[in-house]
Image: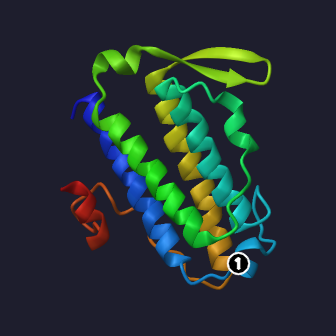
Amino acid sequence: MNAPLAYHRMALNNAWANATLYAALSGLGQRAFRAPRPGFFPSLKATLNHIHMVDLYYLDALEGGGLGRTVFDAAEIDDPNALGTAQAATDLRLARICKGLTDERLSETCITARADGPVEEKVGAVLLHLFQHQIHHRGQAHVQLQEAGIAPPQLDDFYLTYGRVPSAAAYWS
């Protein structure tokens, strides 16, 4: 498998995992969404909004949008269904970026706006970090979901043919 295809598959896995997680919490009311939960961020609302905002930050850097750290000025989304819709749109944006990747593009740089000034990063490294960031915090949301009394969904059966959950198969077509 070539590198651009691997990045595209990671983006599809990311979109599937987020859609699966949001489907599991679709019946969760706003009160339970905001309720204190164990984790790095104190609630599902805070954890999932953090994932979404960081995605927007890195997508802006990859696209050269110029928003930089101002993406973090946006208000958190209070409704889990609205946040799921926003995350799905962000995931689609990421998948489109990754579908168009080339080896050359992965080696290019983009600028990330940091508190102490701009930093030049390799596109491939930014994408790998974005995927890892998602996995890290989605795992925390997984535990928070369980603590809320909802059975957390299986999120790691995407790549292998053996055991691939039916909902993941749709992302492979």
Residue 71 in the figure: left or right of residue 164? right
As rendered, which of 4 and 96 lies closer to the eye? 96
Residue 163 in the figure: left or right of residue 29? left
Which secondary structure lies at badge 1? helix
Query: In which quadrant will I find the N terminus?
Result: top left
Can residue 77 be seen here? yes
Give above or below for 84 relative to 101: below
Q: Give the colour scheme of this rendering.
A: rainbow
Disc 1: which residue: 30
Give above or below for 30 relative to 5: below
Please, what is the three-letter code of the amino acid marked with disc 1?
Gln
Characterize the local packing of mark 1: few (<14), some (14-19) or many (20 or more) Cα atoms within 10 angstroms: few
Indicate the position of residue 132 as horizontal and vertical percent values.
53, 43
As rendered, which of 18 and 70 lies closer to the eye? 70
Indicate the position of residue 36 as horizontal and vertical percent values.
81, 72
Query: In which quadrant will I find the C terminus?
Result: bottom left
Can residue 7 be seen here? no
Q: Residue at x 26, y 72 (%)?
A: 166
Q: Residue at x 79, y 24 (%)?
A: 115
State the image quarter where residue 43 is shown: bottom right
Indicate the position of residue 77 as horizontal and vertical percent values.
67, 61
State the image quarter where residue 56 is shown: top right
Give above or below for 77 relative to 98: below
